[in-house]
Amino acid sequence: MGAAGAIRRAAASVVDRACAGARGFRRALARFAPRPSAFGPAADAEAAAVRAVRNLRTFRFHYAVLQWVLLLASLAPRHRASVVFLMAASKGLLVYGGLLRAFPNSALLRRLLDRRLVAAVFVALVLADIVAAGAVANLLAALAAGVPVVVLHASFRVRDDLEGPSQDAAAENGKEDEASAVVEKKEDGDVEAGPTRRSMAAAPRSPK
């Protein structure tokens, strides 16, 4: 009975993790490409460049995952050992990201394992493995397939649904709320003080 219960709990845990992963993937996909109306041309070349830079910062993780999947797919048929090595390297990178998220204020992690240093080591390992496996053509094919998608998405993805109300609009709303509150207080004061004033005016004055 104990072993069966442990197996059921383990199976339930695996199912919960799979469901959570599926929900996270669906949210990420919905944020990356929610609907056709979220894409549109920019007003001019300068606006398109600004939008592309902002989208590259916002969706850098999505773009990296897309390029990574294309690279692994190109290596899978003939370079399975490279696929296994790159997946292990990506696991190590995910562990590092998890540590940064779990300990965001850790000076030890930020000094000894700087993000740029970890990224440089990861890229160096990937390139070294690809060159050693003779899969440079696969890397170029993955880049040729992924870079145009990234450029088009970054240029046409509208950011209106990603950004909240601007600070100016929030300040204006705050001023309007304060003004309306002051007006309401004045009106309430007039209503409360109105009968008192009328009663004082109607009351007979006492002879001196």
Image (cartoon, helix red, strand yellow):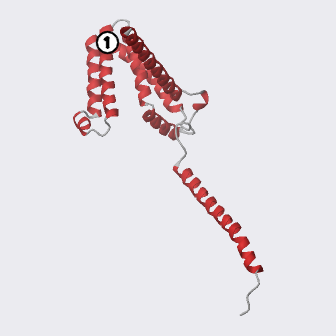
Question: For the residue labelled by badge 1, is the local secondary structure a helix, a strand or a loop?
Answer: helix
Q: Is residue 63 left or right of residue 200?
A: left
Could you say which quadrant of the image residue 141 lies in?
Answer: top left
Instruction: Specify few, some or many for label 1: CA neighbours under 10 Å numbering under 14, 14-19, or 20 or more.
Output: few
- Return the residue found at the far top: 78
Q: In this view, does 97 lie to the left or right of 25?
A: left
* Quadrant showing the N terminus: top left
The structure residue drawn at horizontal position 46% and vertical position 26%, both measured from the top left corner, is 150
Q: How many labels does the image show?
A: 1
Of residues 58 and 7, the one drawn nearer to the viewer in this rendering: 7
Q: Is residue 184 left or right of residue 131?
A: right
Could you say which quadrant of the image residue 74 lies in?
Answer: top left
Compared with 15, 196 (above or below) is below
Q: In this view, does 188 lie to the left or right of 23?
A: right
* Quadrant showing the C terminus: bottom right
Amino acid type at mark 1: Val
Q: Position of residue 121 (x, y in %)?
A: 26, 26
The structure residue drawn at horizontal position 49% and vertical position 31%, both measured from the top left corner, is 154
Q: Position of residue 148 (x, y in %)?
A: 47, 24
Residue that badge 1 annotates? 84
Could you say which quadrant of the image residue 119 lies in?
Answer: top left
The structure residue drawn at horizontal position 55% and vertical position 45%, both measured from the top left corner, is 165
Q: Position of residue 4 (x, y in %)?
A: 39, 8
Compared with 101, 202 (above or below) is below
Of residues 75 and 15, the one drawn nearer to the viewer in this rendering: 15
